Amino acid sequence: MITTILPIHRYDTPELAKIHATAMETDQFWKLMLQGKPPGTHEHIMIRNILSWIEDPTARILKAVNEDGDITAWACWLTKEKQPSPEEPAPKPTSPTNDKPEISPRAIGQRLQKDSAKWEADLIPDDKYIVLQALATDPQYQRLGIGSKLFEEGVAKADELNMTCWCQASPAGSQLYSKAGFETLGSDEYDLGEFGSYRFRYMLRPRQLGNKD
């Protein structure tokens, strides 16, 4: 199958959101986040995210297109500047009734946001770096190397700019990123209740030696 990598257009947004929702349909974390929500919520969330990324001047959003013109996968990379590590709030007194973290989309989403920001601030050595914000392949086109091709485009751009790459990897994505030279520097595991446990890995690909500043 012939695959072409192209920049997205704003009018691609609904299709990109649909691909992401379909690709993540069996993902445990998304199942918890969408629990009790009406159909179409995933697409709505992603449309909002994609439109915000389109407005970001640092964003590089690419799509993989087949010979029929269908979008088969897409990826978003953002350039970010390092932020100071968030201050840890004073620990609250615990009791036997509240030792276990709350399991709800809101509580786990807040913990993930805080944990992710801390890992990013503590582990990235550079003031400016590139982040893989999203990568999704339509399930009917998975295992054909399309996601890898998109991913390699982003990594190649980072090498061209001599910049560090960073990503928060789901269990499904960490193996792909490892093959591209990303190292796991930390991880957090979340109890998702009926959906089991879920581990996010924080992965970094250093600036490549030999490139010029």
Image (tube, grey):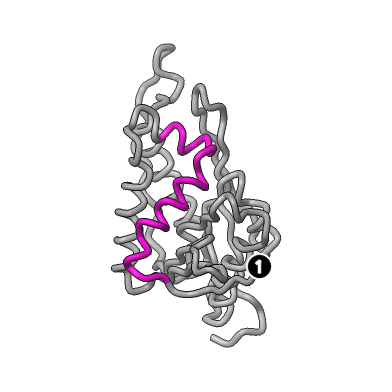
Write the residue at 67% across / 64% down.
180
Above or below, 189 relative to 79: above
Is residue 26 one of those drawn in magenta? yes
Name the magenta segment's main secondary structure.
helix
Tell me what residue is drawn at x 47 percent, y 69 percent.
62
- Image quadrant of residue 82? bottom left
Please state the horizontal and vertical placement of residue 125, each as a whole percent of the image: 52, 66
In the displayed image of the protein, which residue is found farthest to the front? 68
Secondary structure under the numbered disc 1 in the rendered image: loop
Q: Magenta includes 66?
A: no
Decide which of 108, 38 is in the foreground and name it.
38
Where residue 150 appears, as percent x and y from the top left, is 57, 67
| Residue 14 location, quadrant | bottom left
Question: Which residue is outermost to the bottom?
Answer: 212
Q: What residue type is labelled 1?
A: Met
In front of the other: 168 or 55: 55
The image quarter containing residue 113 is top left
Q: Which residue is at 52% across, 47% downward? A: 23
Q: Position of residue 96 (x, y in %)?
A: 43, 12
Q: What stretch is highlighted in magenta?
A: 8-33
What residue did someone put label 1 on?
1
| Quadrant location of the C terminus in the rendered image | bottom right
